[in-house]
Amino acid sequence: MAKRIDVTDLDVFYGSFKAVEGVTFSVEPRSVTALIGPSGCGKSTVLRTLNRMHEVIPGAYAEGTVLLDGEDIYGADIDPVNVRRTIGMVFQRPNPFPTMSIKENVLAGLKLDGKKRPKSELEGIVEKSLRGANLWEEVKDRLDRPGAGLSGGQQQRLCIARAIAVEPQVLLMDEPCSALDPISTLAIEDLIEELKERFTIVIVTHNMQQAARVSETTAFFNLAGVGKPGKLVEIASTEMMFSNPTQQATEDYISGRFG
Amino acid sequence: MADLTRREHDESEALLHEALAGGHLPRWSALGVAAASVAVAFLLNLTTGVDGVAGTAVVAMLVFLVGQTAWSFVVEGRRHAIDRLATTFVYATFVIAVVPLIAVLGTVVVKGAEVISVEFLTTSMRYATPTSEGGGIYHALIGTLEQVGIAALFGVPLGILTAIYLVEYAPSMRTRRLAHSISFFVDVMTGVPSVVVGLFVYTAFVLTLGLERSGIAASIALTILMLPVVVRSTEEMLRIVPRELREASYALGIPKWRTILKIVLPTAMSGIITGAMLAIARVAGETAPLLLTTFISQSINTNPFKGPQAALPTFIWDQFTNGTDVSVNRAWGAALVLIVLVMVLYATAKLISRFTGVKSS
């Protein structure tokens, strides 16, 4: 199921602006890797290049290689739509589809990929995905109600259920808790703990305690200066990063001296 | 000693209350000033050159403005005076805007209701003359329904697809300049007078291509008139669909065309339907292009591809120019039917959009 990711010499551009430069790192399967760093350092940009979501923004392109279990996802004959089916994504703000019920939201990725599936199979996937997102008990009696009627934390778990319903290999999370209160954040963090048994997870977060709590590996990104591209400063096991970082910039950031 | 401090205490409390509460006009002030201004205007009407209903009303309004503002300024202070002045202006503009609307609607309903009967709705003008009673709008009703229906059949999908191209496809392709010029021409087209469009269809389709003067020629003209309105409104609606929804869909591995069809369009649907209905309602009342493309007919013609066809707007114009009492009454009846038709269309669209659009919890 879960797959590893190897990023080599990745540069990302928005038009003529180079946003990220020379990023190289690996993500182990069935682990949580946290990307931390100050705002605008390109960590979300790097995350988006892992499933080619940056291509949605006009003028954005990437150079370098991103390998998924050895397969280059930027290869000439690779279809980005298939890449995104394999590498799912959860966004900063909960974004359930407002025209759909809770059930339809969960099934959106399966219903809209063009393949027909028997109804009984879909029913099973709804329950499995919602249970997987720790939401089943809260919504099982109102699956036909609009997804937008849930609370913020429930909506975010609905979005996670929607993302895991298509059975991806990797789950990318772009600050999934920054719009949520501490209780909902805890619920999501518990969920991440469970999800890493099945998926490879890469999470961008502004919250260093969160990175320390949920991740095995932490990567610290920083800007070389104003108007300069973001860089990967260092990547190591989370324990190492928070107790004994090798770079001064990392220590300054983690101890709150800047950023 | 104790008495003195108590009095001081009371005084300072009164001062504080005064400072926080400020002066107030009595509750009846607005009504009172209004009544007084009308009285003053009426007096001026009798004694001086102020004349007529409109003149008296304007004078009363001015007296009200000056009187209320001055009184408020003295009692309540500058801020409240300005507030009352602005409030009065807002209310006044509202009334000025609404009065003609209600007057038009009221006149049409009152005059039209007298004429409307089963016979009026089910007979044509084939055997009626400008001076004879009887006759009806059946032929015109058929014409309008067919012409506007065909125009909507072409115009709405074409307009929605154009807007989808402009919003969803143009920015990410190397056709940005093309998109800008399309946008520009759509704006220009909104302002083109309908008679010009009628002339264009007449010269291009009737004179040059040899199309018969018929319902379909009228439909082409109406389609052209409708397009920019549909494009504009759909474009606005698509633009306010959050980018996050599109990204959420892409991230699930849903292809772009399906994202547009199943996520973006349904989210924007109620606004798109409203815009399309406004466009249809707008062209349903067009007269000039119909006169140039299908002209007038007094008989039933259900075939939009052959021969002149009547329509409600041209029927109204035709009956009005006859000038006799019966004819003008028939024009009022047709006007009422036209308004009801637009209202029914609009209500239907609202109903449809309630069941298709964004779900509320």
Image: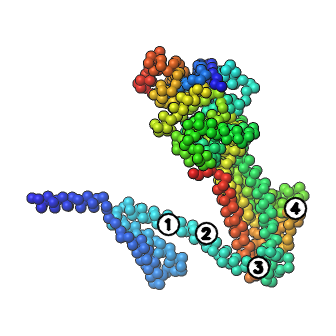
As helix, strand or loop, the secondary structure at mark 2 comes to helix
Residue nearest the observer in this picture, B135 or B204:
B135
As helix, strand or loop, the secondary structure at mark 3 comes to helix
Q: Which three-letter amino acid code belongs to the residue tagged 2?
A: Leu
As helix, strand or loop, the secondary structure at mark 1 comes to helix
Marks 3 & 1, CB-CB < 8 Å contact = no
**In 3D space, how far apart are the residues under numbered discs 3 and 1 (Cα atoms)?**
39 Å
As helix, strand or loop, the secondary structure at mark 4 comes to loop
Q: Which three-letter amino acid code belongs to the residue tagged 1?
A: Tyr
Residue bearing the label numbered 4: B305
Residue A200: % across, % down: 60, 25
Q: Which three-letter amino acid code belongs to the residue tagged 4?
A: Phe
On screen, A249 above or below B123? above
Sooner in the amino-acid sequence: mark 3 or mark 4: 4
Residue bearing the label numbered 2: B101
Name which residue lies at 34% across and 62% down.
B77
**In 3D space, how far apart are the residues under numbered discs 3 and 2 (Cα atoms)?**
24 Å
Residue A196: % across, % down: 57, 27
Labelled disc at residue B327: 3
Q: Where on the picture, by quarter, is residue B106? A: bottom right
**In 3D space, how far apart are the residues under numbered discs 2 and 1 (Cα atoms)?**
16 Å
Residue bearing the label numbered 1: B91
Labelled disc at residue B143: none
Sooner in the amino-acid sequence: mark 3 or mark 2: 2
Residue nearest the observer in this picture, A191 or A105:
A191
Q: The numbered mark 1 sits on a residue in which chain? A: B
Q: Are marks 3 and 2 on the same chain?
A: yes
Sooner in the amino-acid sequence: mark 4 or mark 1: 1
In the shown orientation, is residue B16 left or right of residue A157?
left
